[in-house]
Amino acid sequence: PVPVPPDFRRFSGQLPVMDRPEVVLGCVAVAISVAALLAPMRSRSSGTEDLLLALLRQERMGADSKQRGTQQQTQVNTGEEEPNALALLSGFTMEQAREHAHQGASEAKSRTPTEVLLDLQRGNARFWMGNAVRPEKSAFERRALIMQQYPSVAVLGCSDSRVPVEIVFDQGLGDLFVVRVAGNGLDVSTSASLQFAVHHLKVKVVVVMGHEGCGAIKAAQLDEETIKNHHLKVKVVVVMGHEGCGAIKAAQLDEETIKKEPADLAKALLGIKSGLDETRLKCIHDPRSHDREAVVCNVANQVKQLAQDQALMDLVNKDELTIVGAFYEISSGIVDFFNQVSVPGSPRVPGRKGVSKWGKK
């Protein structure tokens, strides 16, 4: 046993813990650590929210993406990320998020198409040179994105897993409006998506991007009989909607308003509208709950359509494929899975209450 000093023994009757100096020393160490942690926070707590806003404004107003990457690297090296962490600890309001969203939209609107395209080229150069900054959004910025989106570029790209558009151009959440389909083909749905980006989101640049070794292009050069039996063997198909989806909101407008949109966009919105349970949605008055249920209903309806494809269901019944719906919550970053279609007896994701099995009945 560790010898106990006489001074400690005098108090042993009143404070038994003092007979254990290792406990006392541990408590002292904890107290010192807590004091060291709180000391810088006390001196800055009054202005942390303003400081976070200033940091975000400074990042958005950088001269170009190269400077932004340099600033982020400097923050990593000098520890300047500490004020941002302190600001996040202190919390932020929806009003601040709204202000940040409005400012971001204003800055995006002020850029010229040439500036936007040059920024995209710089991002790609960072990627292939191995200097990508991988811009991530903080909880504050994700919350601001609930208010509105303000991408400057729309990209029609291929669904190929080797060509993730945001990574190839070193962009973050909210920077690009991406439409991906095998062979980057232009049909009613992809054309409608680009029309939405141009007419409603006011993007400055539209990019149609193919890629080396495109399987869809190779397959399209085969004879017709071979094409009918040509496909990949993925294991899971996820149909994912998200919080604040502009297309779902637009699809809930009256038909006359929708028909005023460009032809392909109007057709796509009317298609979405036909799958929504508008009678049920009219009973939900909370805006955020209404938004979520509309998106979930649309996803569930698309899962239902996939489950009616006999070729897909043959794979499901062989336990070679699972189809599942998903909802992405922008503010938290969480993906919620539901309406799983898989072979009976297989493990299932937790279900959601309040949603019929296939969405619209």
Image: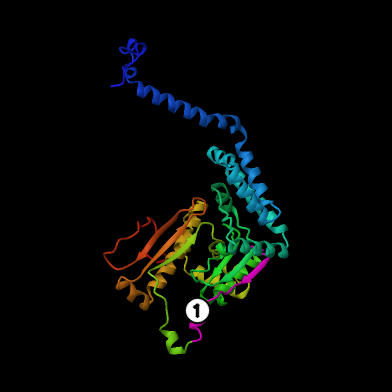
Q: Quadrant of the C terminus?
A: bottom left
Query: Would residue 260 be visible to someone looking at this image?
Result: no
Q: Residue at x 66, y 67 (%)?
A: 199
Residue, disc 1: 216
Q: Is residue 216 magenta?
A: yes
- Camera-nearest residue between 71 and 334: 71
- Spot occupied by residue 95 in the image (x, y as percentages of width and height): 61, 44
Q: Is residue 150 magenta?
A: no
**Does residue 73 appear to the left or right of 316 in the view shown?**
right
Kindly indicate the quadrant of the structure image that contains residue 18: top left
Kindly indicate the quadrant of the structure image that contains residue 234: bottom left
Q: Residue at x 35, y 70 (%)?
A: 321
Q: Which residues are magenta?
A: 201-221
**Does residue 276 appear to the left or right of 311 in the view shown?**
right
Kindly indicate the quadrant of the structure image that contains residue 149: bottom right
Q: Residue at x 32, y 16 (%)?
A: 4
- Camera-nearest residue between 258 and 316: 316
